Amino acid sequence: MEQSAAFFKQKQWIDQYRFYLLISLRQRSFIESCLCNHAYCLMQLGRVKESKELYENILEQYPENTIAIKELHKMALIVQAAQDLAL
């Protein structure tokens, strides 16, 4: 995943011309998608802290990223539910 993000950071022109090159109207850039996919994979592997940090990093770079917003909200709800059960 990190290699994909690095590739698209080096070749940002691909994102700029993706419609013409790939006939793609995606709203998210390829870099943004790579980072979200990486964070999701980390979560699935149980590496929650790393996933959370990456989602927070995504929001710093892309403040309106709905995936990162939803996933961080979901994590907060899970933590809150676990705390409620512990009481």
Image: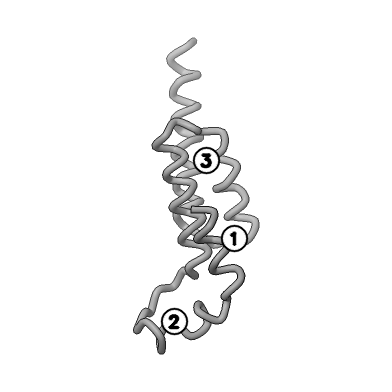
Mark 3 lies on residue = 51
| Nearer to me, 19 or 8 | 8
Within 10 Å of disc 1 (Cα), the crowding (few <14, some 14-19, many 20+) is few
Compared with 77, 87 (above or below) is above
Compared with 5, 70 (above or below) is above
Q: Distance between the residues labelled 3 and 1?
A: 17 Å
Q: Earlier in the sequence, mark 3 or mark 1?
A: 3
Within 10 Å of disc 2 (Cα), the crowding (few <14, some 14-19, many 20+) is some
- Which three-letter amino acid code belongs to the residue tagged 2? Arg
Mark 2 lies on residue = 18
Left or right of residue 80, residue 24 in this image: left
Residue 22 location, x and y as percent?
37, 82
Quadrant in which residue 53 is drawn: top right
Residue 17 location, x and y as percent?
48, 85
Residue furthest to the top in view is: 87
Quadrant in which residue 40 is drawn: top left
Residue 78 location, x and y as percent?
44, 29
- Which three-letter amino acid code belongs to the residue tagged 1? Pro
Mark 3 or mark 1: which is in front?
Answer: 3
| Nearer to me, 18 or 78 | 18
Residue furthest to the bottom in view is: 20
Residue located at (63% from left, 60% from top): 61
Q: Distance between the residues labelled 1 and 2?
A: 22 Å
Residue located at (52% from left, 82% from top): 16
Compared with 76, 54 (above or below) is below
**Element at label 1:** loop
- Which three-letter amino acid code belongs to the residue tagged 3? Ser
Mark 1 or mark 2: which is in front?
Answer: 2
Numbered tag placed on residue 63 in the rendering: 1
